[in-house]
């Protein structure tokens, strides 16, 4: 099904990717699917699944997949990104793709930090959360990217799930794919583990994720 | 006899892109290339095979071009000045992944927002604007008929050799309206290539784990670029009434200044000056061997350009003889025939 994961031990990315792949395989849609990858931990998915993939630049996967889908409307186009790529450097393009209702599916893996660079403050870092660039705690509230998307697009499928609820994650990803097939934009944000940046062990990692769920509302928007 | 029409540069470019088989443009309005975007949109109303998206910025336009190319569609963008700066993000991805990325650049004055119509200050940016020594094909036309032919070549080179390819022009030439006719010989289009398709699984990357892996990729790119150079390098030597053997002075200019310099050669001939023009058409790859062959016999070189010296630097990099170089360097301002004539005549 996949190669060995290049992700850190305990990372949530493989859960998201395997869940996506399971759906594509069940639907017999692996071949028509293309997974564009943002730069950040997302880039490590480049040879993980048996689907076409390509890496892009940090924050640029959404406009790249907008171009791909417009050139090949019969494809299933996924933009796979982290929270920094989606809501900070790439926010402008994310909102405009949503506003235009471009029929692509954006998957945002939200672990509340810039993880590939070691754990700096991200747009999704919680208030008072300690990061490498907020050593005394983040002074700001995090951004709710999904609320922004909903504000510019009433037709899109917009939902948030988490890696410790794979059943719900699968349901939302399936709905997002359906939304793309119907010609609409879709976005699924997945709250995900990053024990390396969080410096958590065992159950602490899951507890951290549960804390994230208190800040980021789970469900369909 | 082919039909003659009265067209401007924007109209010629749109027509050339359509004839090149381009199907989609992604762009953002910026002077002096906005009319390429609006011109393309107008054509797409008549031809349902043509598509366009006005994106949120040049960054998105560039990456959407990358995405469309990945999917196997001939796509392109047009931009200028500060937009050319933003375009470097996507161009750098195209450099790294050897994407057949086509950009039409209309140079305007800089730095910053500068002036909006004309300069020759984006030569360095077009050739070397990416991080990490990406290799690009850059062509500079001096009139509208050449603009058409070179645009067709830009697409063909991009797809044949898989290097990002740029048509580098300026707002003066884009706004020029001239008598125009299509070239006598038909230009065939290179075949499309889909980098990603359903027939095979590909995993395409632009980031490497090992330094040596990246180095060997770049060495291969360099080798490919050098092999290609022999096939595509292009230039014009304009002698006026002189023969090659009697040339003493050489003017070097590109683009619209090249057209001006041609008139200066004619004028100088009337005054018995043995002067010729060397006009690089491919700024990258630069016609190095051809310039050096010519420069051996030359006493004085005059570089004339609408920049502080970007063409001058290119010439210096490539010149193997120590011929004296002087010139006219007018950043973002046009060069006139009389100035070139005076420069050559005043040289002792």
Image (spheres, coloured by chain):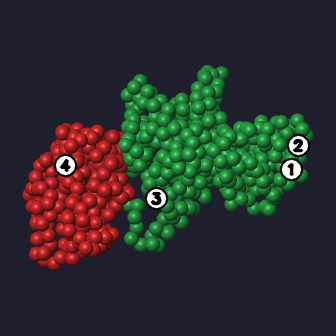
Between the C-alphas of marks 3 and 2, the distance is: 47 Å
Question: Which chain can be seen in green?
Answer: B
Q: Which mark, residue B273?
A: 2
Between the C-alphas of marks 4 and 1, the distance is: 69 Å
Hey, which quadrant is residue B109 in on the image?
Answer: top right
Question: The residue marked by circle 1 belongs to what chain?
Answer: B
Asked if B50 appears above or below A82 in the picture, the reply is above
Read off the residue under disc 3.
Answer: B96
Helix, strand, or loop for circle 3? Answer: helix
Check if mark 3 and mark 2 are on a common chain: yes
Read off the residue under disc 1.
Answer: B347
Other residues around mark 1 within 10 Å, as few (<14) / some (14–19) / many (≥20): few
Residue contact between numbered discs 3 and 1, judged by CB atoms under 8 Å: no
Read off the residue under disc 4.
Answer: A147
Q: Is A115 on the left or on the right of B54, as rendered?
A: left
Other residues around mark 2 within 10 Å, as few (<14) / some (14–19) / many (≥20): some
Q: Is B325 on the left or on the right of B221, as rendered?
A: right
Question: The residue marked by circle 2 belongs to what chain?
Answer: B
Q: Is A97 on the left or on the right of B42, as rendered?
A: left
Q: Nearer the viewer, mark 2 or mark 4?
A: 4
Residue A158 visible in the displayed image:
yes
Asked if B18 appears above or below A124 in the picture, the reply is above
Helix, strand, or loop for circle 1? Answer: loop
Q: Nearer the viewer, mark 3 or mark 1?
A: 1
Question: The residue marked by circle 3 belongs to what chain?
Answer: B
Q: Position of residue B17 (x, y in %)?
A: 50, 35
Question: The residue marked by circle 4 belongs to what chain?
Answer: A
């Amino acid at each position: 099904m996949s190669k060995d994961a290049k992700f850190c031990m305990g990372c949530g990315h493989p859960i998201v990717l395997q869940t996506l792949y399971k759906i594509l395989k069940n639907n017999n849609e692996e071949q028509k699917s293309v997974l564009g990858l943002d730069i950040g931990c997302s880039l490590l998915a480049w040879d993980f699944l048996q689907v076409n993939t390509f890496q892009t630049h940090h924050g640029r996967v959404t406009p790249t997949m907008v171009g791909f889908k417009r050139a090949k409307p019969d494809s299933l186009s996924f933009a796979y990104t982290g929270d920094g790529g989606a809501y900070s450097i790439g926010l402008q393009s994310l909102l405009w793709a949503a506003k235009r209702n471009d029929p692509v599916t954006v998957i945002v893996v939200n672990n509340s930090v810039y993880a590939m660079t070691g754990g700096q403050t991200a747009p999704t870092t919680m208030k008072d959360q300690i990061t490498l660039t907020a050593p005394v705690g983040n002074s700001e509230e995090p951004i709710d990217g999904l609320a922004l998307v909903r504000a510019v697009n009433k037709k899109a499928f917009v939902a948030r799930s988490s890696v410790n609820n794979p059943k719900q994650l699968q349901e939302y990803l399936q709905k997002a794919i359906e939304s793309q097939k119907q010609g609409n934009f879709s976005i699924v944000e997945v709250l995900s583990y990053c024990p390396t940046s969080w410096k958590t062990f065992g159950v602490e990692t899951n507890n951290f994720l549960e804390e994230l769920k208190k800040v980021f509302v789970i469900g369909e928007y | 006899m082919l039909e003659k029409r009265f067209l401007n540069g924007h109209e010629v470019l749109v027509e050339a892109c359509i004839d090149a088989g381009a199907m989609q443009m992604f762009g953002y309005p910026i002077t002096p290339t906005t009319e390429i975007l609006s011109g393309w949109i107008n054509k797409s109303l008549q031809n349902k095979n043509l598509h366009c998206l006005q994106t949120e910025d040049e960054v998105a336009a560039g990456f959407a071009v990358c995405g469309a190319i990945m999917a196997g569609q001939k796509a392109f963008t047009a931009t200028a000045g500060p937009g050319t700066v933003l375009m470097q993000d996507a161009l750098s991805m195209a450099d790294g992944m050897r994407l057949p990325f086509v950009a039409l650049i209309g140079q305007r004055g800089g730095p910053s927002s500068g002036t909006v119509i004309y300069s020759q200050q984006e030569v360095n940016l077009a050739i070397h604007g990416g991080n990490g020594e990406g290799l690009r094909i850059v062509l500079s036309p001096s009139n509208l008929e050449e603009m058409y032919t070179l645009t067709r070549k830009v697409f063909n080179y991009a797809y044949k050799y898989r290097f990002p390819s740029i048509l580098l022009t300026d707002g003066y030439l884009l706004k020029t309206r001239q008598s125009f006719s299509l070239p006598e010989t038909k230009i065939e289009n290179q075949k499309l290539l889909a980098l990603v398709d359903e027939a095979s699984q590909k995993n395409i990357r632009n980031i490497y784990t090992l330094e040596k892996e990246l180095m060997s990729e770049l060495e291969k790119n360099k080798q490919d670029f050098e092999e290609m150079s022999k096939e595509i390098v292009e230039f014009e030597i304009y002698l006026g009434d002189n023969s090659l053997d009697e040339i003493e002075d050489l003017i070097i200019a590109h683009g619209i200044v090249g057209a001006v310099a041609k008139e200066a050669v004619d004028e100088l001939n009337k005054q018995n000056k043995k002067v010729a023009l060397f006009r690089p058409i491919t700024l990258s790859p630069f016609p190095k061997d051809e310039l050096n062959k010519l420069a051996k016999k030359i006493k004085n070189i005059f570089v004339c350009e609408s920049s502080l010296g970007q063409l001058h630097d290119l010439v210096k990099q490539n010149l193997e003889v120590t011929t004296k170089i002087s010139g006219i360097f007018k950043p973002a301002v046009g060069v006139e025939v009389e100035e070139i004539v005076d420069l050559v005549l005043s040289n002792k």
